[in-house]
Image (spheres, rainbow, N blue to C red):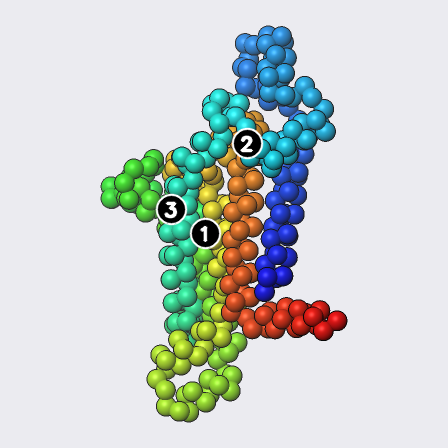
Amino acid sequence: MGKYILKRLLWMIVIILGTSFIIFTILYFTPGDPARLIAGGNATAEDVENLRHIMGLDKSYIQQLGEYFSDTFLHFDLGTSWVYNKPVVDEMLVRLPRTVIIGLSAMVLNLALGLLMGIFAATHEGKWQDSLTMGIAMVFISCPDFWVALMLILLFSAKLGWLPAYGIGGPQYYVMPIICSALGGIAVNARQTRASMLGVFREDYITTARAKGQREKKVVFRHMLPNALMPIITSIGAGFARIVAGSAVIESVFSVPGIGLYLLTAINSRDYPVVRSCVLFFAVFTSVSMLIVDLVYAFVDPRIKAQYSSVRKGGQKK
């Protein structure tokens, strides 16, 4: 098991380093001069050149890349925002809780509703309940997040006045962003749960459990669901990473000052230290989420344990 964890950690490091290299290279070769944009239209050529020197843009690609990797991975310094002139890590720590609150709440919501909808559809296979549930899931997954967000603002803010349209404050400010973030995940989890449940629906042990006279609810939740969890676990981990990494759209529509909005603002203003740091954060978050999924998968699936146990025993025999 230890070898399995080490292998996943090594892959996570490779992914993070590769993502950092790619985003740095893309930003370096992007047309345009960030110094000219940040300096403003009234700045002289001398002012722009001085700003380029301060920002380190007058150095070669290799020099900038080396300094970026050294500062980020050896000194754990994400740099200073060119626009706000504040350390990027300080600003991210302020914004991070808002993004995580929305992501975690949306994940709990789409997990609970998605599992229930999938189980309900699977236990009513071929009936109108199945068709209705999957139809609702199809609507959820088909509607773009920004469109749903605008419709919710029109209904609950403009028409009914129940919820604030934008900004951040008390719990009521998080309701609509959480709902928008959760809808797609609800549909994915519902469809995946239904497919997984139907995969074990007619297995021999399910038939035996029913033949023993066990109640259908017990058969579903004690026998069917645990054996259908493998694909669902993968879907949950990928969904959580997708919610947080895709927070930019939701935070932009609702003006939530989180990591996603921070990234969008930095892209528009060519604030490269912020862009690189936010992309790195999303890469780390996604990698950690998938690592946790892999570990849970290994814990639940005895075949993975047996695989690495047999490798270890074989090595000892040699």
Amino acid at circle 1 = Cys
Q: Residues within 10 Å of mark 3 (few under 14, many from 20)?
A: some
Q: Is residue 148 visible?
A: no
In primary-sequence order, the first of circles 1 and 2 is: 2
Amino acid at circle 3 = Ile
In the picture, which quadrant includes the N terminus? bottom right
Disc tally is 3
Amino acid at circle 2 = Asp
Residue situated in front as seen by the camera: 21 or 143 = 21
In the picture, which quadrant includes the C terminus? bottom right
Residue depicted at x 38% and y 46%? 101
Question: Which quarter of the picture shows residue 76?
Answer: top right
Q: Circle 3 sits on which residue?
A: 101
Q: Height in image: 37 above or below 25?
A: above
For residue 70, side relative to residue 167 (left or right): right
* SS label for mark 3: helix
Q: Position of residue 182 (x, y in %)?
A: 41, 53
Residue depicted at x 64% and y 52%? 11
Q: Residues within 10 Å of mark 2 (few under 14, many from 20)?
A: some
Mark linked to residue 77: 2
Q: Position of residue 306 (x, y in %)?
A: 61, 73
Residue depicted at x 48% and y 80%? 201
